[in-house]
């Protein structure tokens, strides 16, 4: 058996070093009246870091994280961390949940107990929530290109190690791409996929018959790249130059990550309307204690430096893979840029399309009830196909 139990246990030395670094932060001065337009607001960052240094209780958060069942799997020499919680209903449907950036497996902590609980119909899920390679407690890739192999690792974990011959999959951000690749390459094992966005890689495919809605979407994507996409460009071109600073400064790391939680969520400009300080800092801590901010940038680097042969190979996989896997989309209004349904239907067998009234990029944290309701509604009629 290549799967072993795992417990999070951060040393006191690491925590003491963190507090010392926070106490020695060299603060920058803000631009008068800029708010968050210039980047992370210095006044808020000082407040957050003061809480981090003096009030944040990592041991309490660590205990809550360890209340879930954590494991590590050796998949052909590559270690993957994951949570595995069994459903409480009859014949639970296995589901793998894949997070994105700049979050972690922490994204799914609210919905895991909701999914494993049996509803009035006795329907529940066996939940597997891994950390992406290079994130959290999974191994860090030592070569480029691992991003295009994640679906293979997930299939090996679910089918060979955990024994699920048929399962469901959900993801957002990078998790959407991984989930798509699962459906493409392992369609015989997928009962269906559920996504919160259409992977941005598709925007580079330029069909000649775009609808007005698609034209508007593609224009918005270009505008997003221009105004908000600098983070992706630097993470995809010079990731290590940035990571050297973020890995050394907890305040810098928090500034880089928390700014996205504010910008990409349905918070109306007040990040703590959606996330508590403890939630924000627990996610940042996963990056800090594992020193994985550098490796978390690798998907961006892989994507931007893949080369023609890689993209030809990926296109061949699309041609040979099944496009019949049932797909559902839960669209939250304050996500980065939302594609119209007709765009998704070019690439997926869309069986369900739900446009939510509230929520943003981090749907499982922001609107867990809405997301779980949509997951259950989509997978309920498909669950018989998920039984081993």
Image (spheres, grey):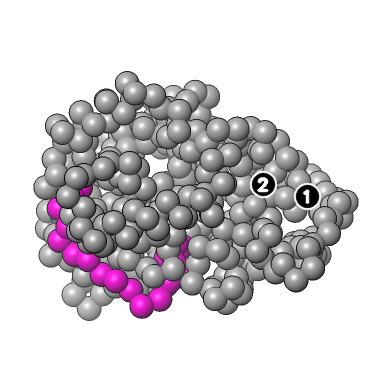
Whether residue 355 is in magenta: the answer is yes
Q: Position of residue 310 (x, y in %)?
A: 33, 25
Q: Is residue 138 magenta?
A: no
Please indicate whether residue 75 sits to the left or right of residue 245 in the image. left
Segment tinted magenta in the rendering: 346-367
Point out residue 159 in the picture as x, y percentages from the top left corner: 25, 39
Secondary structure beneath dot 1 equals: helix
| Earlier sequence position, callout 1 versus callout 2 | 1
Between the residue at mark 1 and the residue at mark 2, the CA separation in whole angstroms equals 9 Å
- Rendered location of residue 315, percent (x, y): 24, 31
Q: Farthest residue to the top: give it.
A: 309
Q: Which mark is residue 288?
A: 2
The numbered mark at residue 18 is 1
**Which residue shows up at 49% across the image and 23% down it?**
143
Q: Nearer the viewer, residue 96 or 337?
A: 337
Residue at (48, 50) in percent of width and height: 225
Question: Looking at the image, do the residues carrying marks 1 and 2 touch, with CB atoms under 8 Å apart?
Answer: yes
């Amino acid at each position: 058996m290549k799967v072993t139990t795992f417990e999070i246990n951060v040393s006191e030395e690491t925590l003491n070093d963190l507090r010392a670094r926070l106490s020695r932060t060299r603060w920058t001065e803000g631009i008068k009246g800029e708010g968050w337009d210039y980047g992370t607001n210095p006044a808020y960052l000082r407040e957050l870091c003061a809480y981090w240094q003096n009030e944040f209780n990592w041991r309490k958060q660590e205990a809550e994280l360890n209340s879930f069942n954590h494991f590590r799997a050796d998949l052909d020499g590559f270690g993957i961390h994951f949570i595995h919680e069994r459903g409480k209903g009859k014949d639970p449907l296995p589901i793998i949940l894949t997070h994105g950036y700049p979050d972690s497996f922490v994204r799914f902590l609210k919905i895991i107990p909701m999914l494993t609980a049996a509803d009035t119909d006795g329907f529940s899920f066996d939940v597997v929530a891994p950390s992406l390679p290079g994130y959290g407690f999974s191994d860090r890739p030592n070569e480029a290109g691992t991003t295009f192999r994640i679906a293979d690792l997930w299939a090996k974990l679910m089918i060979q190690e955990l024994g699920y011959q048929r399962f469901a999959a959900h993801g957002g951000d990078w998790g959407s791409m991984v989930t798509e690749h699962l459906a493409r390459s392992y369609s015989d094992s997928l009962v269906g996929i559920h996504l919160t966005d259409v992977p941005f890689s598709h925007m580079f495919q330029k069909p000649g018959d775009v609808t007005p809605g698609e034209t508007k979407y593609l224009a918005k994507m270009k505008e997003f790249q221009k105004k908000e996409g600098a983070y992706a460009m630097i993470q995809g071109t010079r990731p290590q130059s940035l990571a050297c600073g973020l890995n050394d400064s907890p305040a810098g790391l928090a500034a880089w990550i928390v700014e996205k939680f504010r910008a990409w969520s349905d918070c109306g400009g007040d990040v703590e309307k959606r996330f508590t300080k403890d939630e924000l800092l627990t996610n940042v801590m996963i990056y800090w204690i594992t020193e994985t901010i550098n490796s978390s940038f690798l998907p961006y680097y892989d994507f931007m430096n893949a080369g023609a042969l890689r993209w030809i190979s990926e296109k061949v996989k699309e041609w040979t893979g099944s496009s019949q896997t049932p797909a559902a989309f839960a669209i939250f209004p304050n996500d980065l840029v939302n594609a119209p349904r007709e765009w998704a239907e070019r690439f997926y067998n869309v069986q369900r399309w739900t446009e939510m009234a509230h929520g943003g990029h981090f749907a499982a944290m922001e609107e867990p009830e809405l997301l779980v309701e949509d997951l259950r509604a989509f997978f309920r009629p498909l669950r018989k196909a998920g039984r081993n």
